[in-house]
Image (tube, rainbow, N blue to C red):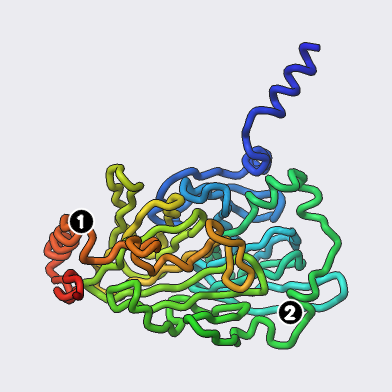
Amino acid sequence: MAKAAAQLENVMDNVPYYEKWQKGEGIPIVKDFFIQDLKKVPVGHWDRIDGDAAFVNMEGAGQATGAYVCEIAPGKGLKPQRHIYEELIYVLKGRGATTIWNDKGAKQTFEWHEGSLISLPLNVWNQHFNGQGDEPARFFSVNNMPIVFNLFHNADFIFNVPYDFTDRFNGEPEYFSGKGKSHPGRVWETNFIADARTFKLEEWKERGASGSNVMLEMCGGTMAAHISEFPIGTYKKAHRHGPGFNVIIIKGKGFSLFWKEGEPVKRHDWQEGSVFVPPEMWFHQHFNTGATPARYLPPRFGSIKYSMGEGFGDISKVDKDVKQGGNQIEYYDEDPSIRKIFEEELAKSGTYSRMNPDLYKKSK
């Protein structure tokens, strides 16, 4: 009886299955609100992929998304893998190639380099190779592992489902060529972005700061992303949304403020390679204090085409005034101290604000 009770207590410990599985994989687990540089996260050997890796459990992800950093040794490749979770991969450094195939024999190989964004079709076999013989290659994977692992709570099933989602991938020519289709609302549907740092964006004036953006729908999945950029000496309007937006800084320097309504503000300074996940429905605001435009990439769970509804990556209210039922604070309604903090930071670096003073005046 005592043994049975102990076993029941172990099962009912209220720890998500995903976290239990992570501990058994034998690699570092990083838990934090903010990571300064993904290129410097310590990694350890991961037998499952025969490469070096570390899980990254961001506090704001809320079990909506998981992440890991992976490093491929010079001239080496990882073990072939397949899995029924989706993932988006951003290449942090290096260059290489990936081969994907399914059980029916459809196969594709494509090359990537620093700045590439890769979306793997669901449950395809995939193998990543480092194309450099003298330097490791490193990438950051954002995925929906927590949802899938906690739902099925069976790792053997997740990594060994013998099913080809031919509606996602069936060996189509130029599948990873980077070609895509444009949709209204700055939406670009594609399977591969050769370089997210230079990808052409469109104006998104509702978010302020003369910013530009593109919404990415990739590989017919429920994982999605967007790329946003804003000019030197400007800052974005504060807004909030659901969990799981992994904001990767891919160009520039600056800082962000985070706050839960009615609570103190947190600040984190960022650079290229930084990542953070704003907690669910916390306001956050991004400031460019560098000498170049600032650009960020937030892979997330919840696409536009295959929407999971409000709270699961929904972005329909992120550029609408909170006073009108949206999730954005207009410049003229923000705390005046925010503008002051920004201008003081710019003064330290010998530059000045490019913000139009009229932005702080509410039109009649």
Residue under the image location 65 percent in, 51 percent down: 147
- Seen in the picture, residue 256 relative to 167 is either above or below; the reply is above
Where residue 335 is drawn, which disc sits there? 1
Could you give the CA–CA distance between mark 1 and mark 2, rounded to whole angstroms? 52 Å
The residue tagged with tag 2: helix, strand or loop? strand
> In the rendering, at what x and y percent does residue 345 appear?
17, 60
Q: Is 32 positioned to the left or the right of 54 in the image?
A: left
Residue 244 visible in rendering:
yes
Where residue 74 is drawn, which disc sits there? none
Question: How many residues crowd mark 2 within 10 Å: few (<14), some (14–19), many (20+)?
Answer: some
Residue under the image location 58 percent in, 75 percent down: 217
> In the rendering, at what x and y percent does residue 160 appear?
82, 55
Residue under the image location 41 percent in, 84 percent down: 202
Return the residue at label 2.
108
Q: How many marks?
A: 2
Residue under the image location 72 percent in, 66 percent down: 122
Which of the 4 image quarters holds residue 362?
A: bottom left
Of the pair 321 and 267, the residue shown nearer to us: 321
Question: How many residues crowd mark 1 within 10 Å: few (<14), some (14–19), many (20+)?
Answer: few
Which of the 4 image quarters holds residue 99?
A: bottom right
The residue tagged with tag 1: helix, strand or loop? loop
| Among the two numbered marks 1 and 2 on one chain, the one whose residue lies closer to the N terminus | 2
The single residue placed furthest to the top in the displayed view is: 2
Of the pair 358 and 302, the residue shown nearer to us: 358
In the rendered structure, which amino acid carries the disc numbered 1? Asp
> In the rendering, at what x and y percent does residue 337 appear?
16, 55
Mark 1 vs mark 2, foreground winner is: 1
Of the pair 71 and 357, the residue shown nearer to us: 357
Q: Quadrant of the C terminus?
A: bottom left
